[in-house]
Image: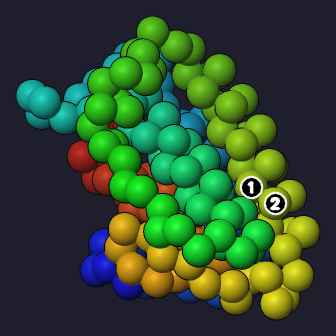
Amino acid sequence: MGDYLKKYISLVKEKNVLNALAESHLEALKLIESILPNQENYSYSEGKWTIKEVLIHCMDTERIFCTRALSFARGETQPSQSFDENKYATNSEANLRLLSDIKEEWINLRSSTISLFKNFSSNKLFSKGIMPAGELTVNDIGIAICGHSLHHLFIIKERYLK
């Protein structure tokens, strides 16, 4: 497993994937609700993403990771492909969207993610597959989803909302 995924997984203290998804969801909503209108399109430095772009990036990554988790649980043996997160952010049109719409999408996406993981049996949660960062279990992917969003929420708090 790649160092960046280990870093994300290490941020999550709760190792039950459903509890971790629920807890990180509540943290995200609390943060999103604290963002003021004049902060939504703020970038702390030239070339850095805005808050909205960071939130969309988290959702894009969650969708991609869910697809990987589903494919591993279903027995896919082909390694999953990497994606260009910067190209996704550039093409997201995040700054044209209302933060309230992004929040609604976050709620719907996380609800769908929880549903997906809720319906994996214990056996399927420990199915393995190959991601660009190396071999992971379905459960690892769920925890990485949480850690990835927590990482970015921390960055928003530290660099954007001071």
* Residue depicted at x 64% and y 55%: 67
- Position of residue 70 relative to residue 50, above or below, is below
Q: Residue furthest top?
A: 96
The scheme the figure's colours follow is: rainbow
* Residue depicted at x 13% and y 30%: 47
- Position of residue 42 relative to residue 136, above or below, is above
Q: Residue furthest left?
A: 46
Image location (x, y in percent) of residue 83 = 37, 48
Q: Quadrant of the C terminus?
A: top left
Q: Distance between the residues labelled 2 and 1?
A: 5 Å
Q: Name the residue under label 2.
A: 116
Q: Residue furthest front?
A: 78
Depth check: give the residue in front, 74 or 21.
74
The number of numbered badges drawn on the structure is 2
Q: Name the residue under label 1.
A: 113
Type of the residue with mark 2: Leu
Q: Disc 2, disc 1: CB below 8 Å?
A: yes
Q: In which quarter of the image is residue 70?
A: bottom right
Q: Quadrant of the N terminus?
A: bottom left
* Residue depicted at x 77% and y 38%: 108
Depth check: give the residue in front, 89 or 133.
133
Callout 1 crowding tier (Cα within 10 Å): few <14, some 14–19, many ≥20: many
> Can residue 27 be seen here?
no
> Can residue 3 be seen here?
yes
User: In the shown orientation, is residue 81 left or right of residue 2?
Assistant: right
